[in-house]
Amino acid sequence: MNKPDILKTLDRSQNGEYCTVKEWDVKRIPRRVSEKLKKYDLIKTSDPENPVNVDGELADRFFKAGYELALELGMLCETTDRIIKVSEEELETAINAAPSELTVGVGEDATVMKARKPSDPYPSKFGASLGITTSEDVWPALTEGIARQQPVDVLEGGSLKSIHGLDVIPSAPSETLVGFEQAKMHVKIREKAGRPGMGGIGQISAVTEYGQFGGYGLPGALNTTDLSLILFPSELKVNYQTLHKVVHTINVGGMIFAGSPAMIGGMPGPPEGAVLSCIACALLQYPILQADVGGGEIYDIRYLSNVNRDGIWALSVTHQALSRNTNLLTHGIANQVSGPGTKELLYETIVGVSTIAASGAAFGTGPRSAGGKLDDYLTPLECRFCAEVSHAASGLPLEKVNDIAKTILPKYETNIKDPNIGQIVHDVYDLETFQPKPEWQKVYDEVKQEAIGLGIPL
Amino acid sequence: MSEIDRLRDAIVEGDEDQAAIAANAALEAGIDPATLIKEAINEPMDKVGKAFQDGDIFLPELIIIGDAARVASDVIVPHISLEDLDASAGGKVVIGTIQGDMHDIGKNIVSAYLTAVGFKIKDLGTDVSPKEFVRAAIDEKADVVAISTLLSTTQPLFANIVKTLEDAGQRDNFFIVVGGGPVTPEWAADIGADGYGRDAGDAADLTKQLLSAGQKPPFDQPLVVGALKQ
Ligand code: B12
């Protein structure tokens, strides 16, 4: 079998130490995190005046503390109330065995992700969009519009609300169905867009493991040159849903793309605590979930975003810590809150995406237009912009990215809690000609010029 | 230090044992139970909620403080005279995240707020099927069923809970309140819920208002709290 170490995870998820979710959430996570913050002198190291960290030594201290945290905590299987712990040897073996280069897709259209260092000129690759819910009539053209954006390296696309007119309902058989039907359309759309070998990410429309069962690794569906998306609950928790997706992906010989955001304001507390939890979580995905590409996601529950100062700082330190100290393929998301047609969406992108790319992430996905909450609030244009910024900002010095963040943040930060949701796709984008409407194009051109002026070589 | 201060401190420290001791001591010292609830629980809890919003305290503290407040109110509420008793006091809420959905952060915050303001909570966790919601509501003799989701595709499952309660002849026994990322007042109206709240503070206000309205469920239109704020 592929990746036989998964057997240890499955065994420990039944026989590991007993711990309830509540004990894990409100006792173990906060206590261990605060111990490590003290031990490594990390308390209040975040600096809102300088949202992008430029201190490599600080990032390395966070890494050491996060590494210890990973070994002391492990992950909790919330279905069984059992802790899945790993030894240092297991962690090291898994980190060393994980790929530091990965080809997604096939042939000329494929993209190669590489482990990077901060300010590494090799571009941080970009997959678009996130699974924003989309009506059935809009989905094919919108997804094709995204695939047609050359800078977008990997295709994810929105989530379908219904399939052949039938509502897609979580855990219901409609999820197994949409898994397959959406994957088939995904493959066709890449061909139609002239990029048949482009890599994909799935399953996205089905929220549970049934999507993977239906649409990943089957003939005609997403295949093993595409990434299998496996998200799991924060902080440091997995469940049967996650583990089913992992086992299925291993069964078919696919690539595991895992992730779970650490929550600022949540169980690990302040931004510094979330960074530690995030590093531990990123590392543990390799031994426990056998990840190929792993997360470094951060979310601030006070802002329902991460493009605020604390969020940006936490993203920068986390990705610097991971990229300076490992050769793993790490992934980040900038959580925009503004919607299509607005300048703010593009400003949030500049700050969030450039921070992740320049801090050393191998891969980014997005955008989360309008916070990802509204049906059909997504256009191919912001997908393009995210990918352009990701590539262009990769090699920038961190000092420069910090300066850019300091200049751009004041243009949107007061609106984060009350964002401009912008416009629905039809109002700002023509899905027949695959062109933005003039007003949206104009906003894009203006902000792009501004970004170039600030030193992002777009 | 006054008995009220002692209780308030125990709650803000999140110390359940001390909260119970201090609540009993305050009652023995003859302090009016309604005053105790107001000054030692409700007022500090408002401050705690604000501190959480401002990032001065974090989710674990919020949950622990909420638990201590619940212990204290369990001691105090039976001593409140009927005319002083807020009709919502001690109401029981069954809460969970709907089937297929594992997003639990928002639900946990709502649960902590409801606990803190004195409701008895049965938290069913995540991935709760309509059938489990209905079963738990009946078995627990709940007053309120609170459903959370972050996934748009779960709307038919919300409708299913309402319909199942109707079909079981049980709809008028429970207030149904809904919230979470994609949920809107229109969503609440479409599925026939009794209330919508935008955030955790709203969830607490909403639940209190529903239980003290002197009207039985179902409502023709959902009571909406916080729709206009972002
Ligand atoms: C964190 C997160 C995750 C984590 C969850 C971790 C956890 N333990 O909860 C993980 C990584 C597991 C995850 C997985 C997925 N996610 Co997710 N996730 C998010 C994210 C980034 C933040 C959610 C969050 O925690 N917010 C913070 C809390 C505090 O806010 P809240 O939940 O809204 O709660 C507040 C209020 O809504 C209210 N409230 C909440 N519940 C209730 C209940 C009542 C009764 C009341 C009155 C009020 C109320 O009070 C709360 C406190 O103020 C959102 C993005 C976003 N913009 O929301 C996406 C998001 C919700 N996820 C999304 C998706 C698609 C998924 C996946 C399906 C992706 C996939 N294909 O694998 C999976 C689903 C897995 C599953 N089966 O559930 C989409 C949903 C799109 C949609 N509209 O349907 C979003 C919007 C992302 C996007 N597309 O941009 N996700």
Image (cartoon, helix red, strand yellow):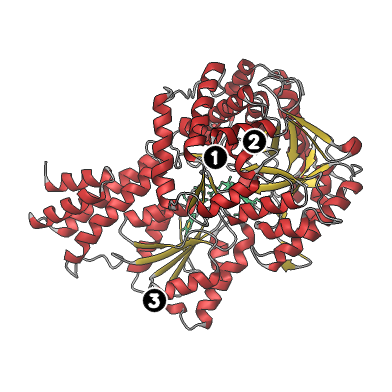
Q: Where is residue A245 in the image (x, y as percent from the top left)?
A: 67, 53
The quadrant of the picture occupied by the C terminus of chain A is top right
Residue B216 - label: 3
Image mark 2: chain: A
Instruction: Please name the residue that numbered disc 1 is placed on.
Output: A86
Residue in the foreground of this view, choosing between A99 and B82? A99
Using the numbered discs, state the Cα–Cα distance from disc 2 to disc 1 in whole angstroms: 10 Å
- Element at label 1: loop
Using the numbered discs, state the Cα–Cα distance from disc 3 to disc 1 in whole angstroms: 53 Å
Q: Position of residue A93 (x, y in %)?
A: 64, 33
Q: Few, some or many C-alpha atoms within 10 Å of disc 1 (few <14, some 14-19, many ≥20)?
A: many
Tag in front: 3 or 1:
1
Say whether mark 1 and mark 3 are on the same chain: no
Report if the CB atoms under discs 2 and 1 are less than 8 Å apart.
yes
Image mark 1: chain: A
Q: Which residue is drawn at 62% across and 18% down?
A: A398
Instruction: Please name the residue that numbered disc 2 is placed on.
Output: A94
Name the amino acid, label 1: Val
Q: Position of residue A296 (x, y in %)?
A: 60, 35
Using the numbered discs, state the Cα–Cα distance from disc 2 to disc 3 in whole angstroms: 58 Å
Query: Is there any visible trace of residue B193 in the rendered image?
Result: yes
In this picture, residue A377 sits left or right of residue B1:
right
Name the amino acid, label 3: Lys
Q: Few, some or many C-alpha atoms within 10 Å of disc 3 (few <14, some 14-19, many ≥20)?
A: few
Query: Is there any visible trace of residue A339 in the rendered image?
Result: no
